[in-house]
Amino acid sequence: MRESFDPYRKWLGIPPKDQPPNHYRLLGVERFEDDPDVIEAAADQRMAHVRNYQTGQNSALSQKILNELSAAKICLLDAHKKSAYDEKLRGESAVAMRDSAAGPSTKTDGEELLAAIDTGQRHGISPSLRGTGRKRRPVWHAPAVVAAGMLLVVSMVVWLSAKSGRQVSMQTVAPSITQSRAAAGPPAVPAHEVDEKVENARTPGDSPAQDGGETKSAVSSSDPTPMPAAGGSGTDRKVTDGQQGAPDAQVAPNAGPQIVDSPPPGSAAPASVAASTEAERIDEGTRYAAPKDTRAAAPTRLALPSADALGKAERLIRETYERELAGDDKAAAARALLAAVAETSDPSERAALISTAADLSARAGDLRLTFDAHETLARYFVFDAPAAKIKTLEEAARTVRANDARIALVNGAMDLIDELSRAARYDLGERAAKAAQTVAARVKDPALRKQVANKRADLEKQRKLHDARERVLAQARRELADDPDDASANETLGKYLCFEMNDWPAGLKHLAKSSPGKLRDAALADLESEAEAERQLAVGDNWWDLAEVAEGNQRPACRRRAAFWYVLALPKLTGLMKTRAEKRVEDAGPIGFAGPAAGDDKYVDIVLAPKTTLRLVRIPASSDGRVGSFYLGQTELTQRQWIAVMGAVPWEQQARADDLPIAFVAYDDCQAFVDKLNQLVPAGPWRFRLPSKEEFAYCFLAGQQAETAYQPQPTKYGWLADESSDAPHAVAGKQANAFALRDILGNVWEWTSDCRYYGMAASDRLGDNPRLALALTSIPPPRGQEYKTYRGWNLGLRIAADAATGAGPPARQTRQ
């Protein structure tokens, strides 16, 4: 089955687990590159390439990527900002080296919460305080139970505490390779025991738990680096080296505690934690300035371990996984090894596990799984995954024999061509196209051969367009270097920044220097306008009028800019002027307008429509440094918020109410929402995403101990089975926790980042496996089914966000 579109991976060669990349990795230059010409050229090249997709079906995604490329370029071309940014990256390297030297660390409460799975009840949409005694249909086996650890433990605490009054301690269950060296393989839970536990623990809100991780990546390099020998084969496979960052942990769906009215350690309690729904209007006096970047430093990717260290780790793998490696199903063995990557913090063990999995999956002919292994290796180590994929593809093309396998290889190659083309790696893309054509020629399918030929021709077309666009922008910049007031060059660059990159703060400065006319007048008025409603309305009218005569992607861009100003003016408008502004805002679509709520940077409001606001809460960093400060939706995403961005609910048969949490959303649906939201809130302070597993666990506990979380009255914080009527309820109906979050206990389960497939082996672990999605639902999908498109009646989401590094330009330039 073909994968859904990932712009980072397809256009920039950055796999899902390496997202978000650091500025250097994003631009494809060496870490700490000091030559501004190199930085500018790299940024221009990548942005020009991404602009090729502005008018297609992925226009929203292209806007998101362009915004981030622009932010990276601005930061690295500013000496002061670059110095601060480089210092931060160096600090990350020091932390990573210190942690590596210190060895494996003890687990935090959040990790224990995620790992404990042996006993207890689970909380879902409506967790129960006692066993119901009802038998449900068998759900899934060991993988699902393991993945649902975080979910099980909270129910365990609630149920056991209510039943016996005893406190239950959390214990981890996923040993490292070293800890399990005496075992023949990962412990498997008998299916009948798992089914019995799951059936007895069922509650109305069962739902998935995912793994994976948002990542902070480093930079690309073109120096060749060998891929570690795998599986004791004795062969050294060479690939080209690159860099992708080490991961943040990913979040499991909603099982967490609800909010207590006490402040987190070291912070003051909010003045009021009154229920705040998404329908609240933004205060008239709101100031729109970006918050400080308080995110924790990301771990730095490491160099590949030495051959001696890898050899030692591979011998340990052969002892630990003797049974799996001896079996006929090499792909299943590869999945088991990839799942075990999360169980060890030893770099040599981790690299050996991944490279052995890549070798096994390649021998099994599973191209997709081999590519996943390459991406996983690049997530932790300095390694060029695209180059490794090309070598794997070319080798498979020489040896594949079965017709079905040939067709699968050709389809995989065409996906890889798209990925390389969008990353502007046209040399590798040409090699992939050549391999695809070679294999397609052996398949008796003229339509497939034609499809490959068209793909190769399109690749060449994209290369030419990329080069042509680069020449135009380079010429404009040369002209501006000679004459900063050159009207034509300023207009070219200004249109590019505003209409294609959505970087209005930078683009308006250039449009203000363009040739006299309506475009220049609108830009000047935009830059000069202040807080008066009449002025704001006039600026909005300027952009609306320009939209009426604009073409291509300029038309919707001008309308959104007009809506931006109309929303500013609306609280002070009356009568027909207000009605007209509201209608135009609706016609313009979602606005994507962000700012501190009521002047308090603990809360940030995202205006999705005139009466639809998404409120984010600033989450403090954890005391152990494992979770940096970030922003998280105060409530689960509501139907009104979803409709404001996406236009319609994903499944019309769900109960409809504006303040009910959105449900029946698949992982792909959630990613589509996040992508569109990132496109709507332009360049500047925000990057929206799903939260990670570790972030979710941290917010779930909110400063509490796992053993006593939300005791003795959990019903104060969440909708439990006894009172929920087996249905979701309007958001913000229960008390908030110490982080001012609502509905994190009960109501709907919440999707988390980077999950793709349902695990198919008893050794699956939640952890860092980026292709694993495990869930317990009322009607589970078939075993082995792709999980990205699965929808459940109790599956929803909560939005997370990061503040951009170095955010804090003048307020007028950060309001959008």
Image (cartoon, rainbow, N blue to C red):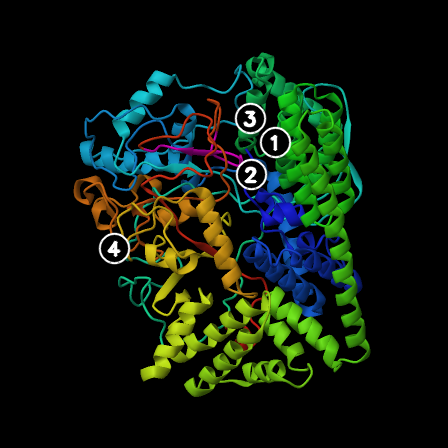
Above or below, comparing residue 816 to residue 170 in the picture: below
Tell me the chief SS of the magenta region.
loop
Q: Sequence-wise, which precedes: disc 1 or disc 4?
A: 1
Q: Is residue 618 visible?
A: no
List the residue tagged with mark 3: 335
Q: Marks 1 and 3: CB-CB under 8 Å?
A: no
Query: x, y (%) of residue 341?
Result: 56, 31
Name the element at disc 1.
helix
Q: Marks 1 and 2: CB-CB under 8 Å?
A: yes
Name the element at disc 4.
loop
Query: x, y (%) of residue 417?
Result: 69, 41
Q: CA distance from mark 1 to mark 3?
A: 12 Å
List the residue tagged with mark 2: 3
Asked whether 512 or 138 is in front, the reply is: 512
- Quarter of the image for residue 287 reads bottom left
Amino acid at circle 3: Arg
Q: Could you tell whether 158 is left or right of 187 in the image?
A: left
* Residue stretch rendered in magenta on the structure: 765-777
Name the element at disc 3.
helix
Q: Sequence-wise, which precedes: disc 1 or disc 3?
A: 3
Q: Which mark is residue 533?
A: none
List the residue tagged with mark 4: 735
Query: x, y (%) of residue 641?
Result: 37, 58
Pick the quarter of the image with the N terminus: top right
Q: Which mark is residue 368?
A: 1
Amino acid at circle 2: Glu
